[in-house]
Image: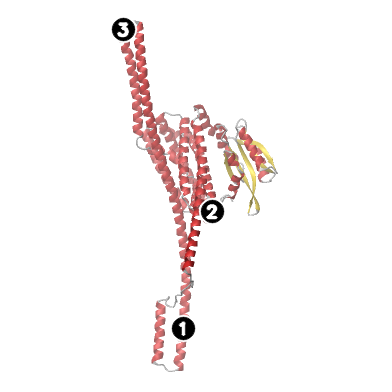
Amino acid sequence: LTAMHSAILDTVDKRQTEEREALMDLIQAAKGNNSVIKAAKKMDQQELKTKLTKLEQDHKNWRKKSQQVALSVSEQNMSKKEKVKFYKGVAERRKEQDKLLAEAMVYRMELEQQMGSKTDDDIAVTLLSNLQEKQESENRAISTLLSSQEEAALTQIKNLQRVGKREGWFDNLTAMVFSMSSAGEGVADDDHELQMMEKMKQDTDRQMEQEKENLLSEAKERSHSEEEVKAALQQLEWEQENKRKRMEDDMSAQRKKILERVAARKKQDTDKETEQLTAMQLVMVAESQQKQQQEAIAREKSHQGSELQKRLEARRLARKRSVEDNKGQENAESQDKPSSSSSSRTVDSNFIDNVLLEQNPFAAMKREKTVLNVELTDKERDDELKKLHREQFNLRSRIQDQQKQQEEMLQRRLKQRQNKKELEAQQLLSLGERQKTQLLNVKQTSGVQVDDDCIHRYADLQKHHKLKYLTFKLSEDAKKIVVDKVGQLGASYDDFVEELKNAGRDGEGRYAVFDFEYNVRGQVAAKIVFFLWVPDGIKVKQRMLYSSSVKALKQKLNGIHIEMQCNDECDLAQSEILQKCTERGYD
């Protein structure tokens, strides 16, 4: 179960990374969708929310349709022609979803601007932060789900993950895009309260200015000296400053309460989405299991029916032969000696038995008993019962211990992932405005090219087996991916890891491929492992550049079996690679 848990969590991590990349793509697409932007600019907040609500319903209908199609087919039973047709339908459905989300993103960003007068860069950072919160909520849901499921259910969850990846089910991303269309109650009250506080502050400032003018006017009428007017003004300004400070403290406390209410509502909504996500996954698992059970029952019934028909046919033929034999014997006896009342009664009895046999085909079947002659003394019986109880108790204890160890291991892994994601979120939220703009422009400016030498060197490793490993890096102008280090045959995995660590100490990331060999049931196997090395200590811009440019390199490197995203030395452990190589799904 531990290997199954790890495989499911790794798939969740990969999908969440894809969701973040898809968010950046949606933001860039929204900025270039001029026709929808023009229409959105003419709408007020209520119209924008109504439009988002309609698009949200359209997406729910799309998801329902996609789910029905995906769970009703089996790729294993498809012919090559049927698979081509099926995957064409998958591409069309994903294209339909992309169009829905791109339009919704335009309305979402316009609504954010009208509500808070934010720039596009600020909105993008906010959306990314909201997406990470929803992903953390999903991690908690997955943790709860995994700890309470058996191996069969976990297998179904893994299968559903594969289907979701194929169909493009980005639940966290879609929930984040449409979250403003179903805002909870109390948002309008909070907005009104903030507006009233701002109006009160403006009224107080005008009142203070009026007091100063009245003081100067009164001093002029009474012909006060300049020193007296100055002293009175200083006294008034001191009183006004204290009054303003008290008012600002009160307003700050009120704002804090409002933010706490908003955070509580947001947490409540997130927890509700978590429950819905868990329930939806359980329902999908149950539906998949029910479908498999129904198919198994149908196959078993068909098999039993055919077997029963064969047995009934055999018995019918046996009865027919028996009747024919009895009739032949009776005819022979009637020719040898005259009939009598006794023989008549015998014939009548046989005739009646045959008729009853025809009416009830099971009348000729004999019931057999199986008797076990086992004699035990009371002491032997008690000893046997105690032995069975001990074995059952020991078995239950071992199972409980194994479940407890698996849950503890799962919780440790989830805690490590959560701490890592929290650190990334804190770094993101602590960025200045200039860094935020640079961060959001990385996606747009990271259209890097792959140097031809990378492809040639990779062919030496993958096809010709002349090299053991390769490391790649971004050029100094970050416009091209070039070869960094070349590992000759005979180089060890430790040598490879040391190269990556050296790059991390210099504050840089790396891409790498390694020809990893391992033993499977006494035989040597090998897989090409791709590494994305972005250690936690490097700068955020470096992390984003390497993460956003990895697709360009992977598209050029064919034949990769396993992908690893490593952020610290623990992720580079050889045991982690070996576990990946031996997991089901990577064979």
Is residue 140 visible in the rendered image? The answer is yes
**x and y, in percent, of residue 6 in the image:** 53, 47
Q: Give the SS element for disc 1.
A: helix
Q: Nearer the viewer, mark 3 or mark 1?
A: 3
Q: What residue did someone put label 2 on?
A: 81
Q: Residue at x 54, y 53 (%)?
A: 81
Other-residue count near label 3 (Cα within 10 Å), few / some / many at <14 / 14–19 / ≥20: few
Q: Estimate the spatial distance between the alpha carbons at disc 3 and disc 2, rounded to whole Å.
A: 98 Å
Other-residue count near label 2 (Cα within 10 Å), few / some / many at <14 / 14–19 / ≥20: few
Q: Nearer the viewer, mark 3 or mark 2?
A: 3
> As rendered, which of 2 and 86 lies closer to the eye?
2
> As rendered, which of 198 and 465 lies closer to the eye?
198
Left or right: 57 as drawn, with respect to 394? left
Q: Kindly identify the amino acid type of the residue bearing the numbered disc 1.
A: Glu
Q: What residue did someone put label 1 on?
A: 324
Residues at marks 3 and 1 touching, judged by CB atoms closer than 8 Å: no
Q: What residue did someone put label 3 on?
A: 220
**x and y, in percent, of residue 342 in the image:** 40, 91
Numbered circle sitting on residue 198: none
Q: Nearer the viewer, mark 1 or mark 2?
A: 1
**x and y, in percent, of residue 93 in the image:** 47, 46
**x and y, in percent, of residue 42 in the image:** 39, 31
Q: Kindly identify the amino acid type of the residue bearing the numbered disc 3.
A: Lys
Q: Is residue 222 above or below residue 394?
A: above
Q: Kindly identify the amino acid type of the residue bearing the numbered disc 2.
A: Lys
Question: Of label 3 and label 1, which has the lower sequence position?
Answer: 3
Q: Give the SS element for disc 3.
A: helix
Q: Estimate the spatial distance between the alpha carbons at disc 1 and disc 2, rounded to whole Å.
A: 57 Å
